């Protein structure tokens, strides 16, 4: 029945573990709608014939004196049953759809994380061990994969018809999508959001491989294009590192180059800004009294717009890195913070005070500083030194 309906509706293969359940809801909605439409059409045809011109039927009959009957002899309970049935059908659809949404939105805890960057007009992928690829996403079959996605320019939309999944990719933010491919194979990827004149050519491919083939393929990929000089800062990365770096190691280097580690610690000790130790997926109290989970989306927002959601107990002294760090560099920093998730922090200790209340420390390299040499900070516009 499933295969018959899939071919009848001309749907692509059900390549992910989520695809079949999504199609079942699709079938349920379509079949119910078609039955309802057929019923309305049959009732309309009946009325056209029964009450056609020249039948002599009285179009204004007297009120029905029977109790609980509406005018014309239709039972009031029948009408209530029809409306109640339609309402119940809507509630059933809502429950099924909401349960599917929760399942799609929450990736399994053992998911493998891959970072995705969309730009006009291509998709780039960075894997945890540091490899990267453009236009082709390699994943292991039979294992859940979580994509953390952002855009370098405009809004894109990552759409895999075979998986029945689509998620917008927004500049300055991180969105996520997860799937599990059932068996090895190739699956096309499209951009489902109009993003410019090259929109129709913004295609990619998901290639699912058996575990052994996947490991061999990943080992043969080139290093991800994450490392590079941070805009406005002086110390460049090595063009070709002596040893391949993991994505977390790249994030550590980017964080050091961008000056993040001047305020954030990685060993749990308090400092000017919240420690990165144990931060990922932790519950964060905010200054406005609310709480949220420090997932990839929150960390990306904090880098781009640090004043939007301030950690309780800390002063807003962090500048925005919008336009300073590229999307791959931000993804690498997030992966580095993720690698510190199991590092314990010092509970109950207050942060160190900021140099001057309300000022933004600017990290500026001195002119003439050679790469690799320690850099001194110069005073900012208020005369404070970070």
Image: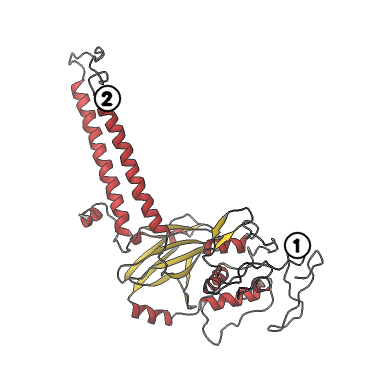
Query: Vertical placement of 220 versus 110: above or below?
Result: below
Q: Give the left or right position of residue 91, taking residue 263 as reference.
A: left
Q: Which residue is at the far right?
A: 383
Q: Residue at x 72, y 71 (%)?
A: 363
| Residue at (31, 34) in percent of width and height | 84
Q: Find residue 76 and name its label.
A: 2
Q: Residue at x 45, y 70 (%)?
A: 113
Circle 1 or circle 2, nearest the eye: 2
Residue that sits furthest to the front in the current view: 348
User: In the image, is 234 to the left or to the right of 12?
Assistant: right
Q: Nearer the viewer, residue 106 or 245?
A: 106
Residue located at (25% from left, 55% from top): 6
Residue 196 visible from this viewpoint: no
Residue 190 screen position, x and y as percent: 41, 61
Tag 2 secondary structure? helix
Q: Earlier in the sequence, mark 1 or mark 2?
A: 2
Judged left or right of residue 227, residue 168 is left
- Judge from the rendering whether residue 42 lies leftward or rightward of residue 209; answer left or right: left
Q: Which percent across, then down, holds residue 374?
A: 72, 82
Residue 379 higher or lower than 46, as above or below = below
**Of residues 13 and 110, the one drawn nearer to the viewer in this rendering:** 110
| Mark 2 burial class by Cα count in 10 Å: few <14, some 14-19, many 20+ | some
- Which residue in the structure is indicated by mark 1? 359
Task: Tell whether label 2 touches label 1 (CB within 8 Å).
Answer: no
Q: Quadrant of the N terminus?
A: bottom left
Q: Give the vertical position of 80 relative to 277 (above or below).
A: above
Is 5 in front, or is 282?
Answer: 282
Instruction: Specify the quadrant that holds the C terminus.
Output: bottom right
Image quadrant where residue 209 sits? bottom left
């Amino acid at each position: 029945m499933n295969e018959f309906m899939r071919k009848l509706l001309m749907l692509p293969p059900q390549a992910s573990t989520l695809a079949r359940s999504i199609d079942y809801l699709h079938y349920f909605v379509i079949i119910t709608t078609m039955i309802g439409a057929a019923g309305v059409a049959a009732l309309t045809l009946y009325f056209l014939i029964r009450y056609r011109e020249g039948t002599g039927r009285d179009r204004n009959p007297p009120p029905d004196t029977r109790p609980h009957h509406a005018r014309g002899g239709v039972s009031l309970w029948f009408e209530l049953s029809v409306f109640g049935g339609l309402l119940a059908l809507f509630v059933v659809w809502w429950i099924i759809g909401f349960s599917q949404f929760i399942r799609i939105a929450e990736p399994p805890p053992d998911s493998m994380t891959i970072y995705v960057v969309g730009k006009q007009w291509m998709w780039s992928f960075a894997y945890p061990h540091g490899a990267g690829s453009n236009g082709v996403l390699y994943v292991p079959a039979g294992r859940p994969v979580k994509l953390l996605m952002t855009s370098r320019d405009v809004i894109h939309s990552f759409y895999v018809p075979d998986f029945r999944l689509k998620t917008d990719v927004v500049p300055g933010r991180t969105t996520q999508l997860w799937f599990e491919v059932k068996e090895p194979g190739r699956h096309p990827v499209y951009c489902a959001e109009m993003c410019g004149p090259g929109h129709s050519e913004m295609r990619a491919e998901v290639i699912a491989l058996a575990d052994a083939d996947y490991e061999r393929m990943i080992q043969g990929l080139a290093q991800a294009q994450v490392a590079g000089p941070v805009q406005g800062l002086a110390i460049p990365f090595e063009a070709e590192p002596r040893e391949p770096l993991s994505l977390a190691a790249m994030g550590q280097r980017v964080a050091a180059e961008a000056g993040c580690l001047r305020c954030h610690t990685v060993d749990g000790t308090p400092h000017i800004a919240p420690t990165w130790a144990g931060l990922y997926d932790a519950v964060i109290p905010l200054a406005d009294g609310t709480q949220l989970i420090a997932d990839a989306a929150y960390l990306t927002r904090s880098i781009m717009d640090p004043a939007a959601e301030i950690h309780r107990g800390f002063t807003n002294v962090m500048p925005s890195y919008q336009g300073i760090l590229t999307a791959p560099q931000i993804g690498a920093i997030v992966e580095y913070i993720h690698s510190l998730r199991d590092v314990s922090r010092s509970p109950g200790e207050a942060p160190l005070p900021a140099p001057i209340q309300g000022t933004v420390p600017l990290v500026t390299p001195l002119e003439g500083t050679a790469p690799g040499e320690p850099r001194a900070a110069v005073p900012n516009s208020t005369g404070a030194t970070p």
